Image: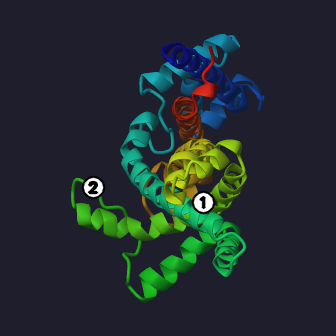
Amino acid sequence: MAAFFVRRLIGAALVCVAVTFIVFVIFIIAPGGGARGTAERIAGKNANPQLVLNVERQWGFNKPFYVQYWKLMERMFTNKLVSYTTQQPVVSQIWQDIPATFSLCIGAAIIWLSFGILVGVISAVKAGRWSDRTITVLALIGISMPVFWLGIVCRYYLAENASVFPDGEYVPLVSNPLQWIYHLILPWLVLAVLFIGFYGRVLRGNILDTINEDYVRTAKAKGLSWTRILRRHVLRTSLIPIVTLFGLDFASVLGGGAILTESVFDLHGVGEYAAQSINNFDLPPIMGVTMYGAFFIVIFSVLVDLFYAYLDPRIRPT
């Protein structure tokens, strides 16, 4: 297991390096325009000629590409990557906004994973009955609703009109735990709806396939109760694909998938920061958030692989 972990860690590090180089190529090299054109893009829409000249010198845009790449990495990892529109360090701004994004994603993930497993188990146990058909219809409705539309509708009717929930904004956990939960309940539910139906359908199919396996028949022949068979044999095997989905979905939501939810509810997280940067065509924050999202996806991919190997030892390489 230790060797497997080391190999996955080395692979993840190489992927992160590759991601940084791809981001460099996409944002710096591919658009072209020469050193002055690249400096103008970095400096922003309203930059004066002197600022453009300073950016060109500081970033080394008149030097070979490997020098430019090194300067970008140096700025990224020494907190010198600055938004020339807001004059704020990008990495510091991301770290400042991470608590709101983490709070949104962790709460929504707990809801969609818990209810997704519950829906999947009930749907599989009641396969073919009216409850299974009802759950299927509700799952398809949840999957089909765009997050931004559902968020706007819920905020309008439940927050602005009925005042059942607060009208947006984020309250830090350390300031007031109860208000933190109260302000995030609606965003959690909106973000989780899409995943609950999808996870429920996937788990239902996995359970129905696993029930027909030989080892399940053997467990039934030994006289084990159906509840024990479901919990100890069927569910553990059926959850392996769910673990993979959860790790990748959580990482993608954390890395930028929550942009629409954060923007609708004014949570001031990393997603909303990215949306504002895109709207202002502020390139340094866009690059920083892109790398931030990619790193989280890589990290959670490693964690998923480790948990995957824990659930099924056959997956571990010898």
Q: Indicate the amino acid at tag 2.
A: Leu
Left or right? Give the position of 179 relative to 188.
left
Residue pictured at 25% horizontal, 66% vertical: 178
Residue extending farthest to the bottom is 162
- N-terminal label among 1 and 2: 2
User: In this rendering, is residue 87 above or below 136?
Assistant: above
User: In the picture, residue 286 is in which quadrant?
Assistant: top right
Mark 1 vs mark 2, CA separation in Å: 25 Å
Foreground: 130 or 201?
130
Of helix, strand and loop, which one carries label 1? Answer: helix
Q: Indicate the amino acid at tag 1.
A: Phe
Give me the disc on residue 195.
Answer: 1
User: In this rendering, is residue 296 above or below 197?
Assistant: above
Q: Identify the residue position indicated by label 2 in the image.
A: 173
Image spot of residue 74 (x, y percent): 50, 18
Image spot of residue 256 (x, y percent): 57, 48
User: In the picture, residue 104 is in which quadrant?
Assistant: bottom left
| Residue 84 appears in the figure | yes
User: In the picture, residue 38 is in which quadrant?
Assistant: top right
